[in-house]
């Protein structure tokens, strides 16, 4: 594992990344990710119904794998409307994502931040 980069822009080229939750009994999922400068975001289309979102609710420590690189991070739900709108615009651009799709109403957005300890 390595420390997260100061700038996630290069990592944004990766379409799908792997997120591991539940450190004591690892659970991994493939998700879309967005790198915007110093910040990296993932979204759960099923919102609270996604199994991995429940794991984050219990323990926000995650590991993110992009290519061969693995980063110990902490998932924090994005609740700021301006930040969420900025990230959603990037999702639309990168994935041709339809923000008017009724499934998007349930989506939860997370920012992945450095952990204080791995």
Image: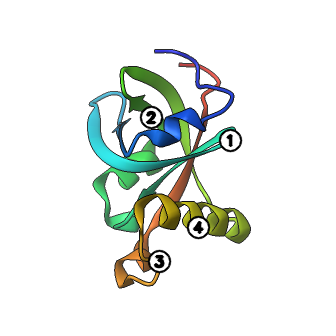
Disc 1 is placed on an element classified as: loop
**In whole angstroms, how far apart are the C-alphas of marks 3 and 1?**
22 Å
Neighbours of disc 2 within 10 Å: few (<14), some (14-19), many (20+): many
The residue at the point 60 percent across, 28 percent down is 115
Disc 2 is placed on an element classified as: strand
Disc 4 is placed on an element classified as: helix
Can residue 97 be seen here? The reply is yes
Neighbours of disc 1 within 10 Å: few (<14), some (14-19), many (20+): some
**Label of residue 89 in the image:** 4
Does residue 86 lie above or below 36 as drawn?
below
Q: Are marks 1 and 4 in contact (CB under 8 Å)?
A: no
Disc 3 is placed on an element classified as: loop
Residue 80 pos. (x, y %): 70, 65
Going from N to C along the chain, the mark reached first, 2 or 4, is: 2
Residue located beneath label 3 in the image: 99
Neighbours of disc 3 within 10 Å: few (<14), some (14-19), many (20+): few
Does residue 73 lie above or below 52 as drawn?
above
Does residue 23 lie above or below 52 as drawn?
above
Applied colour scheme = rainbow
In the displayed orientation, state which residue is furthest to the top.
1
Going from N to C along the chain, the mark reached first, 4 or 3, is: 4
Residue located beneath label 1 in the image: 37
């Amino acid at each position: 594992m390595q420390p997260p980069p100061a700038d996630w822009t290069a990592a944004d080229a990766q379409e799908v990344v792997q997120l591991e939750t539940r450190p004591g009994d690892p659970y991994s999922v493939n998700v879309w990710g967005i790198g915007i400068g110093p910040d990296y975001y993932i979204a759960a289309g099923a919102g609270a119904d996604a199994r991995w979102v429940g794991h984050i609710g219990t323990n926000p420590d995650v590991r993110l794998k992009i290519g061969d690189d693995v980063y110990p991070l902490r998932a924090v739900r994005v609740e700021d409307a301006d930040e969420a709108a900025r990230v959603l615009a990037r999702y639309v651009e990168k994935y041709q994502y339809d923000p008017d799709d009724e499934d998007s109403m349930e989506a939860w957005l997370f920012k992945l931040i450095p952990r204080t300890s791995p």
